[in-house]
Image: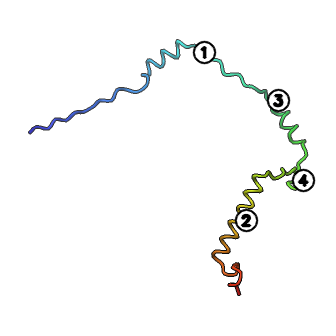
Amino acid sequence: MTETTITAVAPPHGLSEDEAGRRLAARGPVESPATSRSYSSIVRGQRLHDLQPVQPPLLRPVAAPTPGMMLISAAGAALALTALWLTDERFVPGRGS
């Protein structure tokens, strides 16, 4: 029996240096993209930002709880109390010491 070995040759990837040079020369000079803000507008924005008063966390407005939040809180409390009642004898009426 004879063994046959097949060797695959990978094709070259990308452009050759000659082709890349030709394409760059044909494209010509490229303008850099325009930015959306000037240096002066960025500096002005930073200066105005620094002048805003800093509110301590306790003085920030707090959102009122929604009914869904209240329901989730009540369900969590009920689950915790049930787990304590099932696992700790001190929470079972008549069995605690």
Question: Can you identify the residue that label 3 sits on?
Answer: 41
Looking at the image, is mark 1 or mark 4 earlier in the sequence?
1
**Mark 4 element type:** helix
Looking at the image, is mark 4 or mark 3 earlier in the sequence?
3
Looking at the image, residue 83 sits to the left or right of residue 61; the answer is left
Query: 10 Å neighbourhood of mark 1: few (<14), some, or many (≥20)?
Result: few
Closer to the observer: label 2 or label 1? 2
Closer to the observer: label 4 or label 3? 4
Question: Can you identify the residue that label 2 sits on?
Answer: 77
The amino acid at mark 1 is: Pro
The amino acid at mark 4 is: Leu
Query: 10 Å neighbourhood of mark 2: few (<14), some, or many (≥20)?
Result: few
Looking at the image, is mark 2 or mark 4 earlier in the sequence?
4
**Mark 1 element type:** loop
Question: Can you identify the residue that label 4 sits on?
Answer: 59
Q: Where is residue 90 in the image (x, y as percent from the top left)?
A: 70, 81
